[in-house]
Amino acid sequence: MTGGGGLADLAWIGCDWGGSSLRVFAVAADGRVLAVRRSDDGAGGLAPDGFEPALMALVADWLPDAPPAAIRVLICGMAGSRTGWREAAYCDPDVPLTRLAAAAVAAPALDRRIRPLILPGYARGDPPDVMRGEETQLLGLIGTEPGFAGLVCLPGTHSKWARIADDRLTASATMMTGEIFALLARQSILRQSLRPAAVLVDEAGFRAAVRQAMADPAAVLPAMFALRAADLTGGGADPAGGDEGRADPERAADRLSGLLIGLELAALPRTGWRAGEAVVVIGAPALAGRYAVALDACGIPARQVSGETLVIAGLRAAHAQMIAAGS
Amino acid sequence: MTGGGGLADLAWIGCDWGGSSLRVFAVAADGRVLAVRRSDDGAGGLAPDGFEPALMALVADWLPDAPPAAIRVLICGMAGSRTGWREAAYCDPDVPLTRLAAAAVAAPALDRRIRPLILPGYARGDPPDVMRGEETQLLGLIGTEPGFAGLVCLPGTHSKWARIADDRLTASATMMTGEIFALLARQSILRQSLRPAAVLVDEAGFRAAVRQAMADPAAVLPAMFALRAADLTGGGADPAGGDEGRADPERAADRLSGLLIGLELAALPRTGWRAGEAVVVIGAPALAGRYAVALDACGIPARQVSGETLVIAGLRAAHAQMIAAGS
């Protein structure tokens, strides 16, 4: 019984709050997603008192005028950082994903119709690593595939690699591959010789660069500048192809991407990867697909899973944990 | 005999035109440097018709009112690039440094009192590499140390490595170490946890990072983000020290610098380096000193030589080549 208004069947709201974007999901009591909205109100651009207005801008018309109880808004990601809405302290890796919701932190809200709850991330030492948001996708993975154990790659601005066993994160590492690529392609001297495309233009060149960097990580720095030198001297960026005899900026961008992802893959043994083990790649199709090609180039089997699907599954699993705990 | 005015004893002018700065040297007939001036009119910020005014702003009052012949202005560096004052096409590595001046290109000048001559750089293929400006320092090195043969490192925004034998560049490679460090330290997520200092603050941490990256280049990407994670979780950036129990942003900057320079040194075998061979490091004292420490951390003997001294020596040698050729 509600006092009127709002989205029919709404039971709770899920929220994936990244550094540069915000996605919200209206969810029914049976777990169906009733509606999805997004905005560019990422946590990186918000002061603590800016989170509630940014959320309400997307969900206000979903809310009944007077719900019998406040609607849970279950949030994962950067809203829980030190400079976010309210800090949700990192969990220790000993805490299983299946108990993540017990560590959720209530965030303050002026609108009494909502009850924002922020899920924590994980932190570990030796070597130090942190994650915020990806843990919810991992929770979604073990919710979707109970008993899952293995190595997961979540590519992005900051790629996360995680090993899961017994519903726990037994290892994790972060590589700033996407951020370094963007800085080099847009702001370094290489910008004059590169033009990143949304899709792979030169898959053969990309594969060759991945293999080169993975087999010989020390080749990466000289090979980067060689992309610029090839352009200046009229040499092709692609020694195998080069149908026009000069560098093509989209092919050069694929080469740089391949060198950096190959350097990332060279660190695979550090994640406990064993030869022949398949890697689950979680992310948006274009980027996850690029990583799947890179892994394939190195003879590593890969399986892609949609990141958005797993975020929803993870929020749903966390919500179920709360219901089960009566919180 | 001059028509009056100008700097007494001026015979010619040397000019080191970098991407972001310009240095000019007034030189006497016997090679003495009479005066030095600099400005921030780097070639990167000038249109072709902006070079002469930028030069004259520094040297106009050195020039006699009516010299009996135009004063040679011998220029090395980026003024000869495709987008510079006038393009001086790259030399092939077969051309010995001792014949570099023969490939100098005259640049147009409105003021008839000067005769600008731009020295070319070198380019090579397989793998592609280019240099503009550093070749003049290398010419200065073999002028100062006749018969020099060996491996030379010229650290900078773009570090150049060159092997010299028989007055020729037999190998070269460029690594964008300085540019990548600046992008990461100032613009990436690491900027929140780093503060670069002018001098080494944590030499032990720097050495450890150099050794780690050189021994295991694949460790570089995960170790970079670990600097941020250590700050977020309150862990020290320096596992050996850590007297305060949390990360120090200047120490973290030294760690990042060490990781990147170590990755650069991991490419040493590509330059034909043989174990035990000393490396000559050419540059400004602070940066050359940092590289000397890095090399020492890896057990590689290093000898520092002043870059400014060698630029002057190289311009002087190129001028002597012109005089000898009667050009």
Image: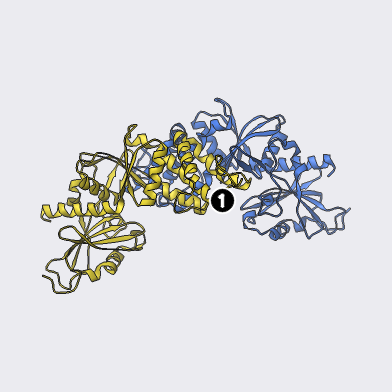
Chain colours: A blue, B yellow
Q: Position of residue B39 (x, y in %)?
A: 34, 64
Horizontal side, residue B187 vs residue A112: left or right: left
- Residue A59 placement, left or right of B282: right
Q: Position of residue B37 (x, y in %)?
A: 29, 64
Is B118 drawn above or below residue A277 in the view shown? below
Look at mark 1 in the image and give the residue it sits on.
B193
Residue B158 in view here: no
Tell me the quarter of the image containing the C terminus of chain A.
Answer: top right
**For this rendering, which residue is in front, A180 or A285?**
A180
Res. A227 image quadrant? top left
Number of residue marks:
1
**Residue at (72% x, 40% y) in the render:** A313
Chain of the residue that carries numbered disc 1 in the rendered image: B
In this rendering, is residue B11 above or below A287?
A: below
| Element type at mark 1 | loop
At label 1, the amino acid type is Ser
Residue B310 in view: yes
Tell me: A60 left or right of B140: right
Could you tell me residue A199's position as x and y percent? Answer: 51, 44
At x 38%, y 47%, the residue is B289
Q: Is residue A183 above or below residue A309?
A: below
Q: Residues within 10 Å of mark 1 (few under 14, many from 20)?
A: many
